[in-house]
Amino acid sequence: MTGKSKTSVASILPGAVTLVLATVYLIVLLRVENQATILALLGVGIAAVVMANWLGWFASVGQSFGEREGPLGLLAVGLAVVVAGYFHGDHFVLLLLCTVLLYTLATLGLNLQFGFAGVLNFAGASFFGIGAYTAAVLNEHTSIPHLFVLLIGGGMAALIGSLLLLPVLRTRGHYAAVVTIAFALLFKTFLEVNDLLGGPQGLQVKSMVLFGWSFNNNIEIGSLELSFYFAYFIASVLLLVGAFILVRRLERSWIGLNLDALRLDETAAQCFGLNIVRWKVTAFLLGNFLIGVAGTLQGFVTGFVQPNSYTFADSLIFVSILLLGGIGNPWGVAVATIIVVIVPEKLQVIQEYRFLLFSSLVIMVLLFRPDGLLPRSVRNYFPGWRP
Amino acid sequence: MDLGLLAQYVMNGLMLGMMYALVAVGFTLFFGVLDIIKFSHGDVLTVGAFTALATFIALSALGIESSVVQLLVMLLAAIGAMAFLGAVIARAFVLPLRSAPPLNTLLITLMIGTVLREMVRLFYPDGANPKPFPRLLPADSVNLGGFNLRLDNVILLVAGALVIVCLQLVLNKTKLGLAIRAVAQDEETTKIMGVNFNRIVLVTFAIGSGLAAFAGVMNGLYYNEINFGIGLYLGVVGFSAAIIGGLGNIYGAILGGFLFAALQTIGAVSLPFASAYKDVFAFAVVIAIMAWRPTGLIPEKTSERV
Amino acid sequence: MTQTSPDALLTVQALTKRFGGLVALDQLELEMYRGEIIGLIGPNGSGKTTFFNVITGLYGADGGNVRFGGADITRSTPQAVYHAGISRTFQRSRLSLPLSIFDNIMIGNHKRLSQGVWFNIMRRGAFRAEFAASFEEARALVEVFDAPLADRMLEPVGGLPMIDRRRIEICRALISRPKLLLLDEPSAGMTHDETKQLMDDILEIRDRIQELSIVIVEHEMGVIERITDRCIVLNFGRKIADGTFAMIAADKQVQEAYLGLQ
């Protein structure tokens, strides 16, 4: 009954192989421009996943991640850098990768609220937008160092979110849903009519400067020239890794258990001493903070903010990512974000139809696979630990 | 402020209240029979309004010019189609999820709403932009000392009131209404007594969705313009109205609809300089009401068994 | 079994609870002592579960008071009641089905686990030690009930049969070492043999934890006769009898209200 056995090296293999194959696939997908080829590639990808699932491959991948999450996580980060390195001069692809990372970060925040604590939030894009607008305003009118701007953006999302705390805490289920929907609609309307925030046209965001170094310029290392988005990519990776570790540790602690307990049965949780308000507030504010930080950096990355980027439909995209990936599973969130962000960008015919497409997909998932593509597994407080 | 303007505000408030009430009644009906909130309700209203518009265009192309005939056919088409759509949604998506957590029903209806909204935006010709809605009601007006009482507005209000009265009669005086009320009271017993539960659910969803279609047409006739987002707005407001009145209570829903419209009108009267913010104000009121009275002015029957 | 320790653990005076016009608990009086096992019986709707819900703070009382270990807990929140040392099980099992056996038991251990955010996230070494100790303790507790079950601590509860779920619910209530355990129909939905097994388990637990007092709501008279020291019979929210099983079984009023109907 010892934790580490000689199979531990072998157990890492399915996960590592899958990560490498997925990376190669992603690079090919990102490179190809011809729409027919992309369509064929997507077909191949879906077929491969179905086949692997049929052969039971994903069970061993799941086990692999369950036991050796640390090394595999490190590998995933390394592979992400490889992808970015491969496309080092390509503005478009790097921007896309940043978007994937920051959407994953934001959805991790949503996961804390919705996936763990069961607090509904259908205004994710609004809090994301609060971060981005904070970046635009602070950047224009103050000289606060941009590292702090990131924190302030997160703080603003948490602060404005706390205005919703009273109704969200006093209501359950569908009532809380309506509060956040009303906020999402309010937020976008407010941005559109408020001239100080640029109205429908929005605002410009000046580029980021960290430790005296401007993110605006392409990076030259010897003869190698990297797109200026590469710096944003690295910043996004660092933030995401930090948030991922935070959310994982939270889940694998008594706090994660508290959140699950209050989501699954508030009455029983009360009878075992759980302070419902404390943990709901913690999850809601921390979740909003992560969403806000992601939005702030996204504001810097895109260079402008406008009301149309933060609509109710965009909030539903965050919810869709969570439901598709598997509520409560951060790896599922990452995979679903890659699909939801990259596929419409590459396959331009569906770009216009993406809200329709993903909401239909979520309906299918809810009907036929309610736990999502990668269902969350039973909590294991330490990866690889066995009694 | 002069009296004429005030009367104008009151008229507008009544009109809004009627539309909110019609939507709120739908939410309350669904909640009554199934204890669920159908978040696609508002978007059914949108599809209903667009169905009416498409019918109008088809009729005009056929050379039918009489506005009475046009209006009647439009109403029939919109209400009929939405009643069918409502029943289909209940049959295909809501009933199959009865054993799943209630959250899944909430999510699936939210996503169905998005699908409907996006379909209107993408597939109705130039659906992304606001569409003019025909003026089919007589535009005569009577001048009552500075205030123009428009005949079309009066017709709309009377029609709305008639629809609500008819609904009351159906619920209170018919066997079908009795069955709906019985299911809302106690599902298990009703089943034992031989009521076809699924059929009652479908009929209720059809009725509620038909009401939404009516409200959609009313909205089009009043503003002479519709867009793909009207249902989302009316859905959120209608739901709040249903909550103000206590979910599951029809009179409460109607009262809630008019109360909400009154609040909004008072807001508009007292803050005329902020007219651009009228929607912001409306949503803020929704949030404030939820914070103040999360289960409505008439409390909902809560009976969690422990 | 005779009463050795005369000091009262739980004292209930004139406790009243109304739901609209319905009086669910009517001037209920009750006294119970440390180490006692009391059977709470009565027809359906006689107020047994309501009694539990009022004691544990889920329902507010409309009158009377409840004292536990000398302190007034009448207006306490469920959280405070738990911290004071009362835990319970539920009539319709309320486990968190997607969570593991261990997680479910740890929900009941809330007051003995470190709840600080910093501790949980940053001090992983200390957390690991607390986790390991808790795991061993939970495992040992489950082992008392069913040894094979103790090897499946990380399996989700949703896949287990009813008897195992009941066991885990009782473990969840016991892990925090309460002074008073409220069992609400532990045998509901179980076969006769399973019920017998579960009662053996409960008696074993009682032997191990001498100070533990138990109130058990039960319909199976065999169970009541076998494990209780004393029975209290409720009818329409009123106490109609209080005594040993033999005494209440011979009581005319009880027979009319309850046993006579069987």
Image: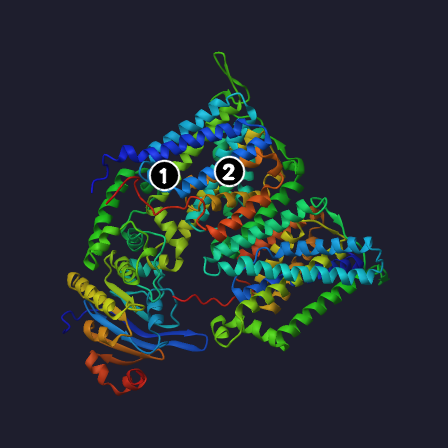
Q: Which mark is residue A339?
A: 2
Dot 1: chain letter: A
Residue A309 lies left or right of residue B215; in this view the side is left
Q: Position of residue B289 (x, y in %)?
A: 57, 57
Q: Position of residue B66 (x, y in %)?
A: 85, 60
Dot 2: chain letter: A
Amino acid type shown at disc 1: Val
Q: Is residue C72 above or below residue A215?
A: below
Amino acid type shown at disc 2: Ile
Q: Quadrant of residue B18?
A: bottom right
Q: Position of residue C83 (x, y in %)?
A: 29, 57
Q: Is residue B181 visible?
A: yes
Residue C137 lies left or right of residue A249; in this view the side is left
* Colouring: rainbow
Q: Residues within 10 Å of mark 1 (few under 14, many from 20)?
A: many
Tell me the SS state at disc 2: helix
Q: Position of residue B169 (x, y in %)?
A: 66, 74
Tell me the SS state at disc 1: helix
Task: Name which of mark 2 and mark 1 comes first in the sequence.
Answer: 1
- Residue indicated by mark 1: A61
